[in-house]
Amino acid sequence: METEKENEVYEGEISVEEENSEQTEKKEEKTSAKRTKGVLRELFSWVMVVVCAFILAFVITRYIIIKAEVPTGSMISTIQIDDRLIGNRLAYLFSNPKRGDIVIFPYPDNEKETYIKRIVGLPGETIEIVEGVLYIDGEVYEESYLNEPMKKENCGPFLVPEGHYFMMGDNRNHSWDSRYWTNHYVAKDKILGKAWLRYEPSWGLLK
């Protein structure tokens, strides 16, 4: 009789086995909740990485660098057809462009097109080509980067306005540049960046 009483469970009471089972279920629920939070936290961190990378890439390409692909041979042999380049948008933030710089800019006669040329004439200078020889302010200017000597042509004189630049290609005999444009000059604030690095098909600094 005493043994039966010991095993009896009165109404409203919970057996030891049931209590342990409930505790186990609660632990499993907590563990599951922690795992779910962990997965969500990991997923959120990856989303934030992607978003930050996208924003960073946008800021860099919009305000720091400019990419360009060269479709013509006007800058041979310095730049080849289909070369891919990176330009520095901040190059002239605190300084002025220099003669010899290779720059990227919208074509003055049609700004939907983007050109890349070398700066030859600076503001206030007079540029003239006589029998294929370049004169700057009446003095012969030697250029070491030309693909070949210029043809015996005559162009100019061109008086470069203040705040503007006279552009020419290194492949001088096959370059559509300031000599032939309707709007001969490029304003400083139109220069998109200074080309400084080729990254495809090979790496190299531009000079």
Image: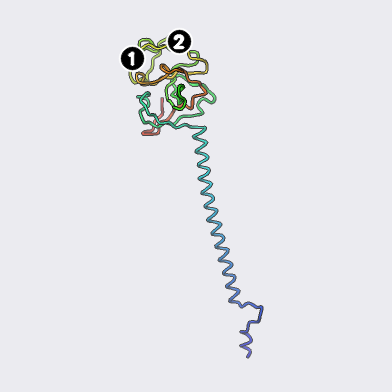
Local secondary structure at mark 2: loop
Q: Residue tagged by mark 1?
A: 151
Q: Up-down: is 40 above or below 10? A: above
Q: CA distance from mark 1 to mark 2?
A: 21 Å
Local secondary structure at mark 1: loop
Looking at the rendered image, the quarter that the N terminus falls into is bottom right
Which quadrant of the figure has residue 73?
top left
**88 horizontally vs 142: left or right:** right
Q: In the rendered structure, which disc, 1 or 2, sits on the residue that comes first in sequence?
A: 2
Please give the name of the residue rendered at 54% of the width and 58% of the height, measured from the top-left corner: 36
Q: At which x and y percent is residue 13?
A: 65, 78
Q: At which x and y percent is residue 27?
A: 57, 66
Q: Up-down: is 78 above or below 128? A: below
Q: Residue tagged by mark 2?
A: 137
| Tag in front: 1 or 2 | 1
Amino acid carrying mark 1 in the image: Lys
Q: At which x and y percent is residue 134?
A: 39, 13
